[in-house]
């Protein structure tokens, strides 16, 4: 099934970004860790939306499409929708600042994104990736067992 392959590809890319985000955090590259975490979460959520037949909008924040599609997901995933939507919204909001800083105020990304924010972003990405990976594994097993 093509949808499974696309979602697997997105999650593979998300996992690579998560690992890089963890490395960036250890190196004190806080803005980069946040940016990679945002990309990980975005790809993970787009994989999940694709799995349930949602054509997501071409933007970074997936909170609204997730909430709108809540009942297409299994119960355990529905129970996490508020977390996932909140994480998506928060990470997307900080995405631009993690790359460029605040040019109007002459603040660099390092002055805007502190270690605590970067650590929290990596945690959001890790949990988001884990939930979306579980969804893929369960749906893949379900479809493989259909005669």
Image (cartoon, rainbow, N blue to C red):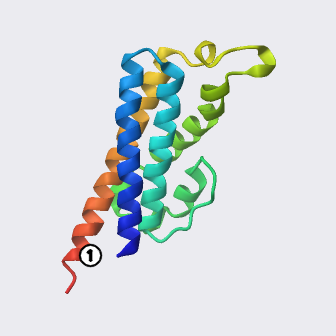
Residue bearing the label numbered 1? 143
The answer to which quarter of the image holds residue 93 is top right
Describe residue 53's horizontal placement relative to residue 76 as left or right: right
* Quarter occupied by the C terminus: bottom left
Q: Is residue 5 above or below residue 127?
A: below
Relative image position of residue 121 (x, y in whole percent) = 46, 30
In terms of depth relative to the viewer, which is nearer, 32 or 116? 32
Give me the residue at 67% from left, 22% from top.
Answer: 101
Say above or below: 37 vs 79: above
**Badge 1 density bin: few <14, some 14–19, many ≥20, Cα 10 Å:** few
The front one of 101 and 53 is 101
Q: Is residue 103 visible?
A: yes
Q: Is residue 81 visible?
A: no
Q: Is residue 27 left or right of residue 69?
A: left
Residue found at the far bottom of this picture: 147
Q: Secondary structure at mark 1?
A: helix
Residue at 35% of width from left, 68% of height from top? Answer: 4
Q: Give residue 94's quadrant in the image.
A: top right
Residue at the far right in the pictured view: 104
- On the image, the x and y values in percent for residue 73 come to 40, 64
Look at 35% across and 50% down and name the residue there.
12
Q: Position of residue 95 (x, y in %)?
A: 60, 34
The quarter of the picture where the N terminus appears is: bottom left
């Amino acid at each position: 099934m093509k949808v499974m392959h696309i979602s697997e590809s997105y999650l593979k890319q998300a996992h690579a970004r998560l690992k890089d985000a963890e490395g960036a955090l250890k190196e004190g590259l806080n803005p980069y860790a946040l940016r990679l975490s945002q990309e990980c979460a975005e790809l993970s959520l787009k994989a999940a939306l694709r799995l349930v037949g949602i054509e997501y909008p071409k933007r970074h924040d997936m909170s609204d499409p997730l909430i709108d599609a809540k009942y297409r997901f299994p119960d355990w995933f529905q129970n996490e929708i508020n977390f996932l939507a909140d994480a998506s919204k928060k990470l997307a909001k900080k995405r631009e600042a993690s790359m460029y800083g605040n040019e109007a105020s002459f603040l660099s990304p390092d002055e805007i994104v502190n270690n605590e924010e970067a650590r929290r972003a990596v945690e959001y990405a890790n949990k988001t990736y884990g939930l979306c990976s579980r969804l893929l594994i369960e749906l893949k097993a379900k479809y493989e067992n259909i005669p």
